[in-house]
Amino acid sequence: MEPQTGHPRRWAILGVLVFSLLAVVLDNTILNVAMKTIADPVQGLGATQSELEWAINSYTLVFAGLLFTFGVIGDRTGRKRMLFIGMALFGLASLASAYSQDPMQLIMARAAMGIGGAAIMPATLAIISNVFPPQERGKAIGVWAGGVGLAVAIGPITGGLLIEHFWWGSVFLINVPIVLISMFLIATVVPESRDPKPSRLDPVGVILSIIGLVAVVYGIIRGGELGTFGSAEVLVPTLFGVLVLAVFVWWERRVEHPAFDVRNFGNVRFSSAIGMMGIVFFAMMGGMFFLTFYLQIVLGFSPIQAGALMIPFAAAQLIFAPLSQRVNEMLGAKTAATVSMLVVTLALAAYALFDQNTPIWLIEVVFFVQGAAMANIMPPATTAIMEALPREKAGVGSAMSNTVRQVAGALGVAVLGSVLSSSYRGEVAPALAGLPEDVQHRAGESIMATVGMAQGNEAILQPAYRAFIDGMHTTALISAAIALVGVVVVAVWMPGKTRVVQRVEEKEPAVV
């Protein structure tokens, strides 16, 4: 293959890679719509709020922890082989998720899906870099990102349709035919490639990162369950996790081939860009978690209606993402990112104004504005990351930003979900005071549990709705405050217009 012309079937190969990634991205957006049904003890598995948080986070934490390692293994053993194996694992784990008999089985199956996803994601980008010449690589990655955006857009409405017409497991079962078609296309269309000088593995770093993150997330979620963060059941695992993560940072600083090179965070521009993306995903994933229950339980929309209501958020990203690089070049990374982060902050704060009587058009406008702002955050962040690292480390920068996004998303679900749970438990307690103590505890775990127990009793339902809305307001303001920190970080440390223009004039696009 000639380096300046690329593979003769490169665009067909790109189509296969985008289709292969469809199942991975689609799954995460579909799951949000299905959570209320999975929580139902009759139609679903009777999962508690904390179990739903783990169903999301078990996938995310495993995915983030193995992303680097599987990228290196793919470079060594063959990226096509790694992609094929990843798709097979993802399909089998999706099948296991669909037929889970209890929440713990679902959590374990989702973790297995994370293993498959971690094998798929880096392989797709590495193959694109290998089959496309430098002058076409930026366009190819744009198409790849557009495919991801399309999956985000169709996920909620697809999930709603499946939940309305089939059982909850169908949101996972739909992955299986996509996986089978992808495996056939990968085997027949995608060429094999390897890195002649691959990096070494860092199994110690991978194990430390997963143990530390799981312990911290467990402590945070447990705090939400108990309604207090001062209990030994919360403090012990959380502090243990922080200690393990400190050991992880120490190890990564001294090992020659780290799984996650923390030394790059010594560069302020790099760390500010990575931090901005982390903050955005922290707020977004945590927000999506409580919005699902707000739309379906408090406002009473069906799964398909709730999915349709999320379309403006995804549509805004599809519309504005292709234009974002032009905005970035025109205004500069600092201005574009600062304005976008400020708009995201205001959108998150707007959730603190939502209640049972909020007009639908206003909800849709906020979703659209937030989606448009997020579409204009990734390019300046990516530009800053590529500015901060040598060109030969472009792949490392991309992998680190992916890892941070996944970890931040998991922490967003854990932290904001626990804040919501703790606030709700305290607010709803007076309405449940006349019930037996064990029933009070179960019913106060989440609004799903309260609604299931109330069975239409308005004397309990209305206080429950008010308690959830108060908790949602608190959670929204906390997420907005965190996003505001991101505004300050970007405004102070993000590189400005001069550096971005210089980067654009270099002609050869960086691989991100």
Image: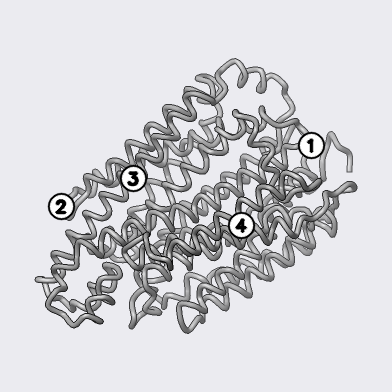
What residue would you read off at disc 3?
A: 478
Which one is earlier in the sequence, the residue at label 3 or at label 4? 4
Picture coordinates of residue 186, whole percent (x, y): 74, 61
What residue would you read off at disc 4?
A: 244
Which one is earlier in the sequence, the residue at label 3 or at label 2? 2
Instruction: State whether residue 392 is above or below residue 88.
Output: above
Residues under numbered marks 3 and 2 in contact, where contact means CB atoms less than 8 Å apart = no
Picture coordinates of residue 475, whole percent (x, y): 31, 50
Q: Find the distance from the CA under tag 1 to the CA under tag 2.
A: 54 Å
Label 2 Cα crowd, 10 Å radius (few <14 / some 14-19 / many 20+): few
Q: Residue at x 73, y 46 (%)?
A: 128
Label 1 Cα crowd, 10 Å radius (few <14 / some 14-19 / many 20+): many
In the orientation shown, which residue stands out farthest toward the top? 498
Q: Find the distance from the CA under tag 1 to the CA under tag 3.
A: 45 Å
What residue would you read off at disc 1?
A: 133
Q: Nearer the viewer, mark 3 or mark 2?
A: 3
Three-letter code, disc 3: Ile
User: Mark 3 falls on what kind of element?
Assistant: helix
Q: Find the distance from the CA under tag 4 to the CA under tag 1.
A: 42 Å
What residue would you read off at disc 2?
A: 357
Three-letter code, disc 2: Asn
Instruction: State whether residue 269 is above or below residue 142.
Output: above
From the viewer's perspective, is 71 left or right of 463?
Answer: right
User: Mark 4 falls on what kind of element?
Assistant: helix
Q: Nearer the viewer, mark 1 or mark 2?
A: 2
Q: Nearer the viewer, mark 4 or mark 2?
A: 4
Q: Is residue 430 visible?
A: yes
Three-letter code, disc 4: Val
Q: Is residue 60 visible?
A: no
Residues under numbered marks 3 and 4 in contact, where contact means CB atoms less than 8 Å apart = no
